[in-house]
Amino acid sequence: MFTVENLAVRLGDKNILQNVHFTIDTPGQLVGILGVNGSGKTTLLRTVAGLLPHTGCCLMDGVPLESLSTRCLAQTVSYIPQQSGISVSMSAREVVLMGCNPRLGVLQSPTAAMCAAAEEALRTVGLADKAEQDYLTLSGGERQLCILARTFVEDAPLLLLDEPDSALDLANRSHMAALLAEFVHASGKTALICLHDPMLMLDWCDTLIVLQNGQVGAMLYPRTDPVEALQSALAAVYGPLELVPVTDRTGRVRLEFSVPSRGLIGYRDEFLTDTKGTGIMNSYLEGYDRWRGDFPSRYTGSIVADRPGSAVAYALFNLEPRGVLFVEPGDPVYEGMIVGEHNRENDIDVNATKEKKLTNLRAAGKDENVILTPVKKMTLEHALHFVREDELVEGTPQSLRLRKLELSAQKRYQMAGKKAKS
C-alpha cells in the first residue's frame, strides 16, 4: 500500500504542491498523474523520490520513505526522470544492468541471473539486437525503451516514471503503456506515471490522479467510473470536451474536442509526429466563447549563445545534458541567439563556440568520438509557439532562428535585476 499524507512543496516564494493526499491500497496498480503544465506532476514524483524538500510524508507499506537511508530508498523507489542524463559511452546492456546497482555491493559485478534478466528485458522492449550498441547512438525512442527495460530489472516495489513516452511515436507509446501495465500487474508493484496523453491513460491506467493548482482535484477509476464522470473531471482541467469513442471501418478512432483557436498554434507538427504522419486533424470555428485563461506554451528556459562564431561539436556535446539543442556543428551563432531549450525554467548563457584545448599529453580513451543527437529543425509555426514575450523569431529566405529581444547578456541581467527589485 502506498500513501501520500499532507504533502506540501514550496520552492522559493511559490507553493508548488499543497495538502496532497491520496492512497493506493491495492498492489499491482498503474496510477496515472494528469494535469496541465505547471500543475506539479514532476514535482510530485521528485518529492516522492526524496529529491525535493517537503512537509508531510510518503508511506510505502506503512514505512515513511523519509526515514530510509539512501541505499534503502534506492532499493524501495525507482525514479525514471524525463531525461536519463547518461552522457558517457556504454552499451544498451550496461544501461539496463544499472538497474541492479542498488542490490550490489561496492565493486561487485552483476550476477548471472541479473545478466539474464537484462537480456530478457531488452527482448521484451524489442531491443535484443541492440544490446551491444552504444546507448548514445540509439534514437531518442530507443533510448526511452532502453530505460524502460532498466525499470523492468529493478526490484523496487515503487516505480516513478516521468513522461517515459516523450520520444516515442504513437505506436510505440501504446506498446510502452501495454508493456508497463502488464509488468506492474504481474509483479504486484505500484507505478506512478506522468503522461500528457489522457487517452493513453484512460486505456491503460487503473487509477488516475488529477492535479489542479498543486492539489488533488479528483481521483478517477477508468475501469468502473461512468463516462460522464470521467468527462466532467477532465473538462475541469482541459476545458470543455467530449469523450467520443468512435471507430470507423478502417480502424481509425475519432476524437472531438472544443479548444480555443490559439491553443492549436504549434500543435499540428506535434500531432503529425505523434501519429507518424497518418493522423488527420481538422478544425472549424464553432463561435465565440468566454476567455479560458492563458495557455503557457512551455515551462522551460532557453539556452542562449553569449558570443558570435560557429557552433563547435565539442561545445554542443557538453551542452546536451542541459536540454534540447537547435543548432548543429558549423552553424553560425551570435550573442543573444537561442541555441536550445533548457531543461529548467531559467535561461542560461553558454559558449557554443568553445573548442577543445590541445595538449601534448595523451591518455588511452581520452579522445572519444563526439556523438550528437540529431537536431530537428523548427517550422515557423513551432517557432511562434515556442518563443516567450522576451524572444523573437528571426526569418530569412534561407534560415529560421530564435533570438532574445535584448541581445546583450549583460543588459538582460540588469533588466532582470530591476524587475526583481520592483
Image (cartoon, rainbow, N blue to C red):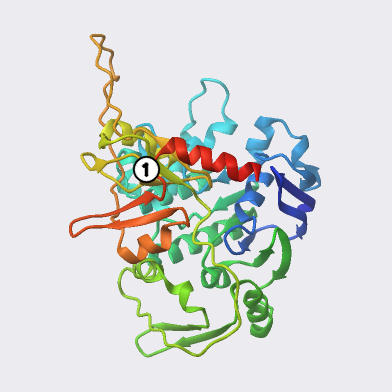
Position of residue 274 measured from the top left corner of the image (x, y, whole percent)? 38, 67
- In this view of the protein, can residue 385 be seen by the observer? yes
61 displayed left or right of 403: right
Q: Residue at x 38, y 36 (%)?
A: 319
In the depicted structure, whether residue 201 falls above or below residue 230:
above
In the depicted structure, whether residue 420 falls above or below residue 200:
above
Position of residue 346 measured from the top left corner of the image (x, y, whole percent)? 52, 44
In the image, 2 versus 278, the foreground residue is: 278
Q: Residues within 10 Å of mark 1 (few under 14, many from 20)?
A: many
Q: Residue at x 60, y 75 (%)?
A: 292
In the image, 236 versus 80, the foreground residue is: 236
Instruction: Name which residue type carries label 1.
Output: Gly
Position of residue 118 measured from the top left corner of the image (x, y, whole percent)? 45, 42
Find residue 201 and report its image quarter.
bottom right
- In this view of the protein, can residue 115 be seen by the observer? no
Position of residue 131 measured from the top left corner of the image (x, y, whole percent)? 34, 42
Find residue 418 and report its image quarter.
top right
133 displayed left or right of 419: left
What residue sits right under mark 1 in the picture?
336
In what quadrant of the picture does the N terminus appear? Answer: bottom right
